[in-house]
Image (tube, rainbow, N blue to C red):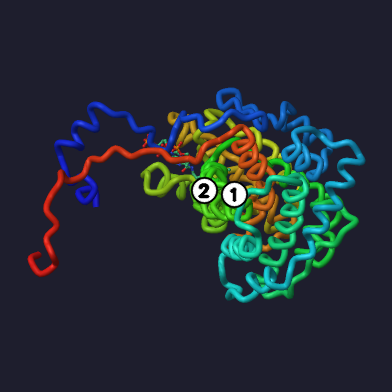
């Protein structure tokens, strides 16, 4: 395979000598932002200037923060009321969107179901970036995404569609639609805080993928489709799911050390939920998810998962110490999701991550375009064959 792409040794050698490509776009800045600040050395994260721990400690509502990302400031009560009214309009999904989910086999990946629903919304939109009433457009999308996520996860566990109902907080309406009843204040609060913790993270792969699409002035649904596709991979949001599978595979805290030896120390596998491009220390979101998991994991199976995770964190940190690799947000979040009662099926935890991230995605796409962002069109350095004559198939 390598050979296939290095067909011209001379150009390849000169490329290696003279050009620098930033693989993975590491340290490439694609836009200014006033949304999210990350200090990867100190492990600090702020949304619009507010520290993540402060936001959580102040019992912020997810919808207040969603408003802030979309409108640039925290809302007044009146502003929040209007915002919530528009979110609630989005709960009422058109039949064709529900059908785009339920016509898929129930064994399908839940993120793919969300994508199918987004594509069906794009299909009836006018395929361009909105110029007016963007705040309302995005608020309605937040309502639609809550309904889409609840219907998708329910479909994957063979339950009939149920839409969120108005008059309740965003987290509670979502959980009620998903689970058929409210799971109680503690779990609703955990859902609310998970929505906040995952709400934005500057320009990771999914946000960047969506910005690329938005930069063509495609419609917001299409930009979200791109972001969903990028989020799904196990190196990004898909890590929540693989981290959970890792805990289930280990199945006993006493097996952690042998598992680390066989898989991580040998370099056979990566420890999922560990490592980050930007953080060179503990991800502050992971610390909060961890404390939530410790508080919530009271039943036998979640307590067991938690003890595996705690032991794995210890052994993993020791094994990867030299590389400066620490737990990221996706390490403890699956345990929190499991404690909330969200069914663990293919893609379901990543889908909840996507639901949480939607305001951040929309805010970044819009910020990029509002600041005059140009169509994203980078270059690649040609290192292939020199010009050669095309031989018809009969001569080859
Ligand atoms: N387990 C074992 N080794 C790791 C891990 C890990 N989780 N993460 C990085 N490394 C090692 C690499 O093998 C590499 O070692 P080397 O220099 O000896 O070859 C070194 O650390 C640097 O790794 P890169 O892959 O170059 O780091 P990069 O910044 O490109 O990747 C990433 C970041 C993808 C998050 C990586 O740490 C990883 O694969 N983690 C596991 C998946 C994961 O948890 N993703 C979630 C990210 S957070 C989020 O999306 C909310």
Which residue does the image show at 74% across and 51% down from the upper left? 137
Looking at the rendered structure, the secondary structure element under dot 2 is helix
Q: Which mark is residue 308?
A: 1
Q: Which mark is residue 191?
A: none
Label 1 CA crowd tier, 10 Å (few <14, some 14–19, many 20+): many
Give the labeled residue for mark 2.
256
Kindly tell me whether residue 295 is visible in this rendering. Answer: no
Q: Are marks 1 and 2 in contact (CB under 8 Å)?
A: yes
Q: Real-space Cα distance between discs 1 and 2?
A: 7 Å
Looking at the rendered structure, the secondary structure element under dot 1 is helix
State the image coordinates of residue 17 (x, y, percent, origin top left).
Answer: 23, 27
* Of the pair 146 and 212, the residue shown nearer to us: 212
Q: Is residue 219 left or right of residue 255?
A: right
* Of the pair 29 and 247, the residue shown nearer to us: 29
Which residue does the image show at 36% across and 38% down from the upper left? 379
Q: Is mark 2 within 8 Å of ligand 1?
A: no
State the image coordinates of residue 320 (x, y, percent, origin top left).
Answer: 46, 35
State the image coordinates of residue 140 (x, y, percent, origin top left).
Answer: 76, 54
* Of the pair 327 and 108, the residue shown nearer to us: 108
Q: Is residue 248 left or right of residue 28?
A: right
Is residue 120 positioned above or below 365 on the image? below
Kindly tell me whether residue 10 is visible in this rendering. Answer: yes
Q: Is mark 1 within 8 Å of ligand 1?
A: no
- Sequence-wise, the earlier of marks 1 and 2 is 2
């Amino acid at each position: 395979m390598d050979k296939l792409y290095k067909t011209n040794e001379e150009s390849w050698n000169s490329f290696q000598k003279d050009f620098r490509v930033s693989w993975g776009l590491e340290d490439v800045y694609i836009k200014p932002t006033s949304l999210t600040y990350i200090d990867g050395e100190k492990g600090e994260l702020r949304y619009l200037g507010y520290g993540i721990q402060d936001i959580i400690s102040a019992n912020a509502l997810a919808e207040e923060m969603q408003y802030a990302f979309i409108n640039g400031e925290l809302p007044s009560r009146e502003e929040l009321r209007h915002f919530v009214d528009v979110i609630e309009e989005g709960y009422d999904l058109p039949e064709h969107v529900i059908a785009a989910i339920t016509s898929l086999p129930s064994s399908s990946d839940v993120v793919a179901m969300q994508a199918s629903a987004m594509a069906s919304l794009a299909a009836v939109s006018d395929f361009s970036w909105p110029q007016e009433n963007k705040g309302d457009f995005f608020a309605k999308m937040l309502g639609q995404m809550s309904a889409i996520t609840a219907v998708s996860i329910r479909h994957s566990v063979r339950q009939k569609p149920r839409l969120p109902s108005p008059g309740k907080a965003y987290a509670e309406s979502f959980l009620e639609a998903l689970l058929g009843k409210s799971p109680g204040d503690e779990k609703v609060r955990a859902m609310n805080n998970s929505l906040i913790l995952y709400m934005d993270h500057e320009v990771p792969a999914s946000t960047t993928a969506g910005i690329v699409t938005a930069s063509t002035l495609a419609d917001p649904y299409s930009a979200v489709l791109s972001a969903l596709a990028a989020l799904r991979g196990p190196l990004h949001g898909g890590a929540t799911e693989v981290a959970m599978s890792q805990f289930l595979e280990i199945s006993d805290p006493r097996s952690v050390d042998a598992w680390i030896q066989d898989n991580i120390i040998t370099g056979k596998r990566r420890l999922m939920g560990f490592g980050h491009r930007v953080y060179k220390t503990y991800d502050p979101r992971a610390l909060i998810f961890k404390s939530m998991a410790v508080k919530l994991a009271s039943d036998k199976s979640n307590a067991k998962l938690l003890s595996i995770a705690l032991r794995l964190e210890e052994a993993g940190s020791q094994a990867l110490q030299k590389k400066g690799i620490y737990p990221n947000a996706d390490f403890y979040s699956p345990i929190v999701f499991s404690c909330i009662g969200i069914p663990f099926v293919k893609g379901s935890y990543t889908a909840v991550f996507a639901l949480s991230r939607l305001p951040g995605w929309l805010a970044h796409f819009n910020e990029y375009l509002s600041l005059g962002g140009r169509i994203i069109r980078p270059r690649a350095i040609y290192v292939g064959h020199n010009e050669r004559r095309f031989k018809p198939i009969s001569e080859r």
